Amino acid sequence: MLADRELTLLGAHGDLTPEGLRRELDAIGPHLRRVPRSTWEEYLKRVEMHPVAGTEPVELETTVPLWTDEGPASRRARVRLLPTGADPLYVARVTGFEDALPLTESFVRQADGRASVAVSDLQPSPGENPVPPRWRPALRAVVHRLVIGDYDGLERDGVIFDVDVPGQDMVKHWIEQQPESLVDLPEAAWDWSNHTPAWHGPGVYTVNVSMWTATQGLSLLMLEGEVFDNGGDDIRVQVYSVTIP
């Protein structure tokens, strides 16, 4: 509804007036559009719903990613879900907006239209649950294939999806949109990796691995995907995005 500028309806049921919503969206910059399907599906796997104190029946609140013609927006929408009494149905209302990244400037636009990470003191945080050693060879092999640009092969093998599909490819597009060249993962990279059990397990884990580039070393680019561990040598990797979280 935000992407489609249905602001009158949103303003009637939210904390911001239609004019207030319009000002927020105009401040984001590039034209807002619907979040790509693959990104939205990945978001739904990770979404955190927080109960709102003092509400009865209990209301839930979360933040929702926004997307522009140039990629992830610098702001997120804060959304509250109100129970309707017909479980599990909720009514959603926009309660505000907040920065998506703690950066003064998230991207620097180059003359050729490519994007690079802005100069910043921000670095990825070390992972709380680094990827186990038994998965590392499989993940390192996938990253190497990204380094050499084997996108078609990775798609044929079911590792990445929607290559060359405008608005849906979340791997090739974002790697090529930044001027830094990816390099193979050094051993130290695993300290900046993380894994958690996926909701549709067992044997399925969400993984996040910070990528490394030729001049930056450790970068803000993040590989996000899943590992399917079926025991023995049966370890399969799927990558959903390589982008700046």
Image: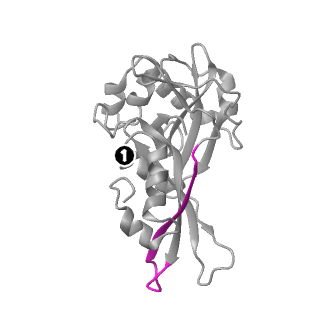
In front: 231, or 211?
A: 211
In front: 207, or 20?
A: 20
Q: Name the residue under label 1.
A: 36
Left or right of 27 in this view: 133:
right
Name the image quarter holding residue 30.
Answer: top left
SS category of the residue bearing label 1 = loop
Residue 31 appears at what percent x and percent y?
37, 42
In front: 128, or 75?
A: 75
Left or right of 139 in this view: 153:
left
Residue 167 appears at what percent x and percent y?
32, 39
Residue 217 appears at what percent x and percent y?
63, 18
Q: Is residue 88 a member of the stretch shown in magenta?
A: yes
Stretch in magenta: 83-100
Name the image quarter holding residue 4.
Answer: bottom left
Could you tell me if residue 238 is visible in this image?
no
Main SS type for the magenta part?
strand
Q: Is residue 8 above or below residue 111?
A: below
Give the amino acid at mark 1: Pro
Q: Which residue is drawn at 63% across and 71% down?
A: 51
